[in-house]
């Protein structure tokens, strides 16, 4: 549903459901033969192992994409909980259960229940920030903005591709000019320590709040 200059217009409220930005994950030629997976990371015998959600098998991680997943997992590892990872790669034959050739690391965080996130498959993007707290959830139905001390705000948006993987989501709603700027850049959440693959800036009427973001299951970039 892209138009000139890669702009995508989502249907105006309240008819969110009438127009979908994406009907499903988009195909990306560079991802041929790869699968996006979520699961648990553990270390054993000097190796990093990945166990997909709902699967008993574990795969030795081979960082073919240069994601630095071993170092990033080590920076989060402690006795406080399990490590969750959202990755893209190829499962290949190998000793034991096999090997995961990891090409992309979307995020890694301390979590024991992220596999059960009911919203993940519906989301195009999630971005969060702190001081003050804010979050943005983007789907084919629109953009929902949550800010501390204020009720959630659901708005339509326009997407503009800016090159080099950067893009901007913007809207004029409730007499406010709102923009979410996103760039492919490793980002560390200042509160949780989670590592995400995108940096984000929420701009409302010129006020800028910075944070991190990652693609949900409805975006295949």
Image (cartoon, rainbow, N blue to C red):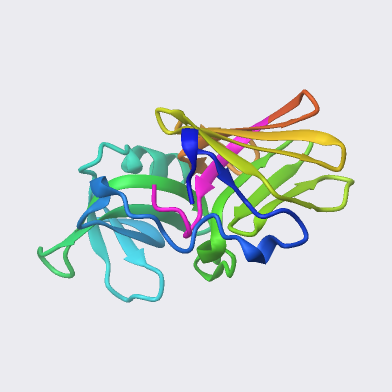
Left or right of 51? Residue 175 is right
Q: Is residue 112 visible?
A: no
Query: Which segment did they paint magenta?
Result: 210-221
Compared to 40, does 130 lie above or below?
above
Q: Is residue 129 visible?
A: yes
Magenta segment includes 105: no
User: Residue most toward the top?
Assistant: 206
Count of numbered badges drawn on the protein: 0
- What percent of the width, then of the height, locates residue 61? 24, 53
Q: Is residue 85 above or below residue 159?
A: below
Residue furthest out toward the front: 4
Residue 38: image location, x then y, percent: 41, 61
In this picture, residue 176 sits left or right of residue 160:
right
At 49% across and 67% down in the image, what residue appears?
115
Q: Is residue 204 left or right of residue 88?
A: right
Residue 181, position as x, y percentages in the image: 60, 32
- Residue 58 x %, y %: 27, 67
Could you tell me which residue is drawn at 65 percent across and 52 percent down? 137
Q: Residue at x 25, y 48 (%)?
A: 29
């Amino acid at each position: 549903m892209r138009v000139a200059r890669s702009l995508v217009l989502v249907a105006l409220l309240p008819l969110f459901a009438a127009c979908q930005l994406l009907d499903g994950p988009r195909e990306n030629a560079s991802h041929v033969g790869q699968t996006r997976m979520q699961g648990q990371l553990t270390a054993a015998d000097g190796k990093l192992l990945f166990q997909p959600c709902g699967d008993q098998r574990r795969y030795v991680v081979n960082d073919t994409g240069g994601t630095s997943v071993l170092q990033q997992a080590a920076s989060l590892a402690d006795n406080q909980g399990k490590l969750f990872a959202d990755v893209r790669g190829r499962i290949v034959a190998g000793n034991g259960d096999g090997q995961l050739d990891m090409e992309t690391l979307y995020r890694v965080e301390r979590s024991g229940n992220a596999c059960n996130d009911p919203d993940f498959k519906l989301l195009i993007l999630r971005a969060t920030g702190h001081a003050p707290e804010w979050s943005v959830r983007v789907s084919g139905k629109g953009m929902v903005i949550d800010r501390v001390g204020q009720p959630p705000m659901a708005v339509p948006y326009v997407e503009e591709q800016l090159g080099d993987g950067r893009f901007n989501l913007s809207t004029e709603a409730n007499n406010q000019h709102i923009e979410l700027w996103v760039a492919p850049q490793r980002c560390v959440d200042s509160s949780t320590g989670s590592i995400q693959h995108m940096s984000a800036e929420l701009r409302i009427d010129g006020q800028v709040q910075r944070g991190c973001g990652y693609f949900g299951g409805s975006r295949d970039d």
